[in-house]
Amino acid sequence: MIRLTRGLAAIGAATLLLTPVEAHAHGFAGDRFFPATLQTDDPFVADEMSLPTLTKNPDDTTGGQSYSVEVDIAKRLTPNFGLTAAYSWNYFQPKGMPAFHGFGGLSTGAQYQLFINNEHEFMGLLGLDVDWAHTGAVHQGGADDHTTLSPTFDFGKGMGDLPDALTWVKPLAITGNLGFSFPTRVNSAGSLNQETFNAGFAIEYSLEYLQHHVKDIGLGAPFDRLIPLVEITSTTPLNRGFSRGLGSTNGTGFATTGIIAPGVIWAGQYFQIGAEAIIPYGEGQGHGVGALLQLHFFLDDLFPNSIGRPLLSW
Amino acid sequence: MIPRAFFSLVLGALCCAGAGCAAAHAFLDRASPAVGSTVHTAPTEVRIQYTEELEPDYSSAHVEDAAGATVSTAAHVDENERSVLIVPLGTLKPGRYKVIWKVLSVDTHVTNGTFTFTVAP
């Protein structure tokens, strides 16, 4: 009996060893580790979860305040294909009016990893995000009464393939999203739902990469895991209120808008913590500075033999 | 309805997976010669300290000179410290060398990486 048990254990151990988890489970391309960015989509499929993401938005144009608590989860079905889901609870405090709150709409996504080039620390991903109609409190939580489809192309590129003489530039990396949003209803409560072009970029300087792959400058914990970054997003309306003949805006608040978010991410073995300031820009945007704090778990490291693996490798 | 179902799904998945909790990817922690360093005495080996223990049979590394020729012999995991990989070197001439490693941590995660060091006259 003992011999049989030992034999089964040996077979189990051998099976584990012969089926190693793919190294690039969460954001690796060669030596480069791309962290999960806070405002823009990651250019990789992964098993991960943000719980929670706490946001204090910049005040709106009237001085009203809003906050949100969000959870995001991403799950690989195969090594190159995964699904995402996000849900939030929102709190609004209009200036001089009673506060209200409610759940935002459900957002889901399907993602396919187009390529990962290890030598050049380069990766690309195609995705389709869907914001679902009537999946939250439309009047209280800011959820939509219509579904919006958003195809995206996401990419990440590290600078580690630059010449060795550029020691201090090699830790740089950029990730980005390019996509469109197509609402499935033309208008809601008298307001036009515009189709938009969306772009987002994250410029990252990885002290982890510098310390462990370029030059040991003596950084110890926790500084050898820090990644300062700046994220920039933009949304540009393409129709339903936008007039090209009048230039970038028709005077009714339909110009390009977005945010600039400087911050820092600390990425450990099992989780990362990120914090960013949120600075809005563009016509009709709020004023002041918001803030975001996120705790993000790497499910593939926390649960490597269960939900941390692609479903088809279970 | 949907919020409750969604959070139940998340929490249920985590609870079901609790038994699967284990160690993580093995990342490079320290190396000797240090990453990107310049040394004036040719080292006889490269020692790489990882953040996790390694599976000896599936962990390896080699060192190449500037021309791409291998200048090391078979790497092995330190018997006394299983998170350390040792790469024996031949006699190194002054020049730039590249360490290329690939390891399997005890929880079956594979990681790989590179770094360089320079031997100066």
Image (tube, rainbow, N blue to C red):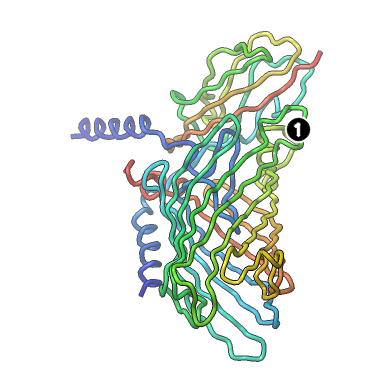
User: Circle 1 sits on which residue?
Assistant: A167
Q: Residue furthest right?
A: B121
Residue at image coords 38%, 50%? A307
| Residue A280, visible in the rendered structure | no
Residue A186 pos. (x, y %): 48, 72
Which element is circle 1 on?
loop
The image shows a total of numbered marks equal to: 1
Residue at image coords 40%, 34%? A20
| Residue A209 image-quadrant placement | top right
- Chain letter of mark 1 equals A
- Give whichever of A106, A248 is nearer the camera: A248
Residue A154 pos. (x, y %): 55, 48
- Tell whether B8 sits left or right of A238: left
| Residue B95, visible in the rendered structure | yes
- Give whichever of A286, A146 is nearer the camera: A146
Amino acid under disc 1: Thr
- Give whichever of A135, A264 is nearer the camera: A135
- Give whichever of B58, A184 is nearer the camera: A184
